[in-house]
Image (cartoon, helix red, strand yellow):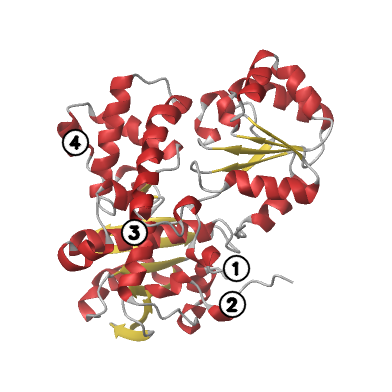
Amino acid sequence: MYIKRNITPIVYELLEDFRIVSINGARQSGKTTLSKEIAKELDMDYYTFDNDSTKTVAQSNPINFIEQLSKKPCVIDEIQMVPEVISALKMSVDAKNESGMFLLTGSADLFKMSSIKESLAGRMVSVSLYPLSYFELDNCSTNILDMLFDGTIKEFNSKKLDYERMIEQIVRGGFPSVQGKSSRSQDAWFETYVEARIEKDLSLVKKISQENKSEINKLLKILASSTSNLLKYSSLSKHLSIKDTTVKSDIEILEALFLVKRVNPYFTNLGKREVKAPKIQFVDTGLVSHLVDTDAHTLITSDREMLGNLVENFIYSEFLKHSTYAKKSSKIYHYRDGDYEVDLVLEQKNGNIVAVEVKSSSVIKTEYLRGLVRLAKNAKDKFLHGYIFYGGNEVLPLSKDGFTFWCIPFGCLFGDDKNKRNNN
């Protein structure tokens, strides 16, 4: 069954205005399915470099290959596998200069690859496709970030889901291939997924030895066990017996493959955002759960710390997905000022922010407001709203020091029956 992706209208819009549009995202996140659907709708030809014959032909004569393709708008899937065609793409779009000539997909961040970064600057625009959001699984096109910024989230009709069922879905994650599978089948899928990313895809970003692959595999598991925590490069380097700079480089590779994200701290002083410690988050909580070998029952009954980290990661990853089709773009940060913390801070280009504290518990305490109040005072008129996402079922106001914050059930991220997309 085809699941509609909420970013689809944006891709259509960009194809009307740009010569090349690239859909980037992790392997198996749905890029091929989406690009084929768009190709069918717009009568574009479809080619994939996952096909050995197509790949060989393109590598042997990139200019002729692209010249033949450019006679009609087309999709080129997994473009990063044949970087040799990039110069030919540049020549083709410069010669023809028409919008919507090429729709590319890539499982490695094209702008992180030096062979592509300069060649297509000004010619290509990129969008990110992450694993399925739970709104997409619920066939809902409403945007959570829009509601957080305009304050209507408190009026949203959140789904009332059993707590353990919500955690089970967080443990499953959003990759299309694991939906509906048993726990055993999910685990088997993630096992082969991680193996393929380490063995096949690392070298697409950087030349790497087998020893380096083993090192990055270990790093990935360590990062999973510390998701939603501050990145401590020195600690990781000691654990792996490698240099700090190597740890940073390895994490950059994992970022380029859309597996992890570094979340910078929020400061009104822009310079501090780059020098203070980032947090590590994963793009998919199913991958985290597999890497730390846990399940919903274990998390709820005996590993509350990991449960809290995983719920925060889940909310981060859902915000990340919603950011791709929100009315206004925003970036995600975390906030730390001494012992005052806020888990997630969303900032729009105009500097306006909303702040979200995450609690896996169904019980709310006023002490949870410490960081939110501190941030509200520091950000002043740029602070629009503050929220606590928690494991309860009721939307509740909570006030302190003249500020009112809203407690929002994290079940709101699983969709709403009243806001289905119109399929007519």
Tell me the amino acid under the disc marked 4.
Answer: Ser
256 to 329, vertically: above or below = above
Mark pair 3, 1: CA separation: 23 Å
Question: Which residue does the numbered mark 3 point to in the structure image?
Answer: 171
Question: Which residue does the numbered mark 2 point to in the structure image?
Answer: 419
Q: Residue at x 37, y 60 (%)?
A: 314
Q: Earlier in the sequence, mark 1 or mark 4?
A: 1
Tell me the amino acid under the disc marked 2.
Answer: Asn
In the rendered image, residue 207, in percent from the top left (x then y), is placed at 42, 20
The disc label shown at residue 141, or none:
1
Q: Residue at x 71, y 22 (%)?
A: 88
Select label 3 or label 1 by which is in front: 3
328 left or right of 283 in image: right
In the rendered image, residue 372, in percent from the top left (x then y), is placed at 31, 71
Q: Which one is nearer the viewer's eye here, 46 or 215?
A: 46
Q: Residue at x 26, y 45 (%)?
A: 231
